[in-house]
Image (tube, rainbow, N blue to C red):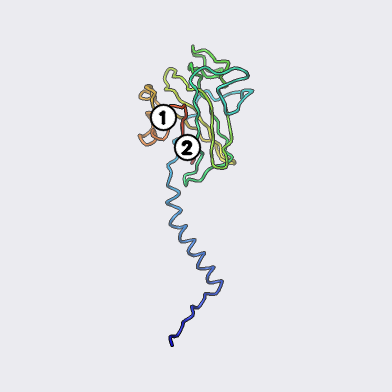
Amino acid sequence: MPVQVQPCPLPVPAVRALWVFTLALGLMFAAPLSAQSLAPTPEQPRGPFYPRQMPAERDPDLAGFGDKAAQGDLIEVSGRILRRDGRPVAGARVELWQTNALGRYHHPGDTGPAPLDPGFQGYGETLSGADGGFRFRTVRPATYPGRTPHLHFAVTPSGGRVSNFQLYFADARENVGDFLLRDLTADQRAQVIREVGPDGKVAWDIVVP
């Protein structure tokens, strides 16, 4: 008659210790890999046209002010705020400011010849969702002397420092001459230049330090 050998169970403390050791070993090797999985979005100067005084309306729909609609081509910019390990950043303050469709900032320091647009808000803000998501409705900005069309973003995680970014458009001919874009490496430029879809949508994730 064959002899059945019963397995000898490990004591509970030993099982728990083995599990903790296995978990720690996995984290020791996995953490450095995940922490380096995403390159941070390159930070760029805030620029001189951040609002001195916030507008009466500062919601994430910049394409209207009061009962007026903004001039220009509508676009929708959406994405996620992420950490370098891919984790979403919930509750971050996300700000957007830009020129109107004629090339003028809603800012007293912009004394250029382009006219103001009374239907354009010029600045908006929102909080990132639980998945890190954000969304803005705005108009496509115009070029002005020395700069290609771009959008300014500022991201401030809850309890963290503010980081400033700029987003560019792939089909803008002025990109080649923009001094701030030229300061970036090819890989960094690929992170901040995006296509505008036929539906006017632009997808852009921001990876904060």
Amino acid residing under circle 2: Asp
Upstream in the sequence, badge 1 or badge 2? 1
The residue most toward the right is 56
The residue most toward the bottom is 1
**Residue drawn where x is 43% and y is 21% of the image:** 147
> Residue 179: horizontal and vertical position, in percent?
39, 25
**Residue drawn where x is 58% and y is 21% of the image:** 64
> Residue 54: horizontal and vertical position, in percent?
61, 24
Residue denoted by label 1 = 195
Amino acid residing under circle 1: Glu
Quadrant of the image occupied by residue 144: top left
> Residue 162: horizontal and vertical position, in percent?
54, 36
Q: Secondary structure at mark 1?
A: loop
Dot 2 surroundings within 10 Å: few (below 14), some, or many (20 or more)? Answer: some
> Residue 111: horizontal and vertical position, in percent?
52, 14
Quick check: 183 above or below 9? above
Quick check: 11 above or below 199? below
Residue 205 numbered mark, or none: 2
Q: Looking at the image, which is closer to me, 176 or 81?
A: 81
Quadrant of the image occupied by residue 1: bottom left
Query: CA gap, disc 1 to disc 2?
Result: 13 Å
Quick check: 19 above or below 78? below
**Residue drawn where x is 56% and y is 71% of the image:** 13
Dot 1 surroundings within 10 Å: few (below 14), some, or many (20 or more)? Answer: some
In the image: residue 182, left or right of residue 31: left
Q: Secondary structure at mark 2?
A: loop
The nearer-to-camera label among 1 and 2 is: 1
